[in-house]
Each structure stands twice: as structure tokens, then as C-alpha cells.
Amino acid sequence: MWIVSMGRCADRSLYTGITNNLEQRMSAHATGKGARYTKSRGLVMLRYTELVDSKGAALRREAAIKALDRSAKLALISTDNG
């Protein structure tokens, strides 16, 4: 299983990514070893997760979420508490 996740950064921006090990990925973000985006902005809180069955599906869903405007992303977050 793969996980598409969205988190809120310290600057209140939203970060979307994929992983097959959420605990390890969150630890990497927390220690500054995650994505370049979160290194400078600091990932504060996981806000949304979605399980998918393959890496390809996760990549497609990540791209679809990233294409949403901020209000649509916030609406998506409100459907799941991470």
C-alpha cells in the first residue's frame, strides 16, 4: 500500500507527498531530511492521508491534489484528520 498525505507547514503552506512508510517519512520531515520543500518551511502537522494500492496510483493522486487550488485542498483536509 502507498499513502498520499498532506501536511501543514510552519508558514501555513500545504505540502503533499507520497510514501509507503508514513512513520519513516514523517520522521524524515521532522529531522529536516524529508523533502526540500519542508526543509525550509518545517512540516508541522499531518492533516490528510489517503491509501492507494500502487506507486503509480499514488503519483497520479498526488499530482491531482497538487493541481487543486488552496480552497479545494482545505476542503479535502476537512474530510480527514490525518
Image (cartoon, grey):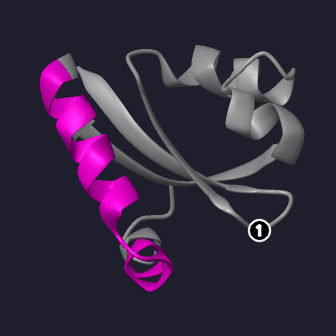
Q: Quadrant of the N terminus?
A: top left
Residue 59: x and y in percent read 26, 31
Instruction: Name the residue: 84% across, 63% down.
Output: 11
Q: Which of 13 and 26 is in front in this view?
A: 13
Residue 61: x and y in percent read 22, 45
Residue 31: x and y in percent read 87, 20
Q: Can residue 69 be found in the magenta stretch?
A: yes
Residue annotated with mark 1: 12
Does any portion of residue 65 appear in the rendered image? Answer: yes
Which quadrant would residue 5 be assigned to in this image? top left
- Could you tell me the amino acid type at mark 1? Arg
Instruction: Name the residue: 41% across, 65% down.
Output: 80
In the shown orientation, is residue 65 left or right of residue 52?
right
Q: What stretch is highlighted in magenta?
A: 56-75
Instruction: Name the residue: 50% across, 63% down.
Output: 81
Instruction: Name the residue: 25% across, 37% down.
Output: 51
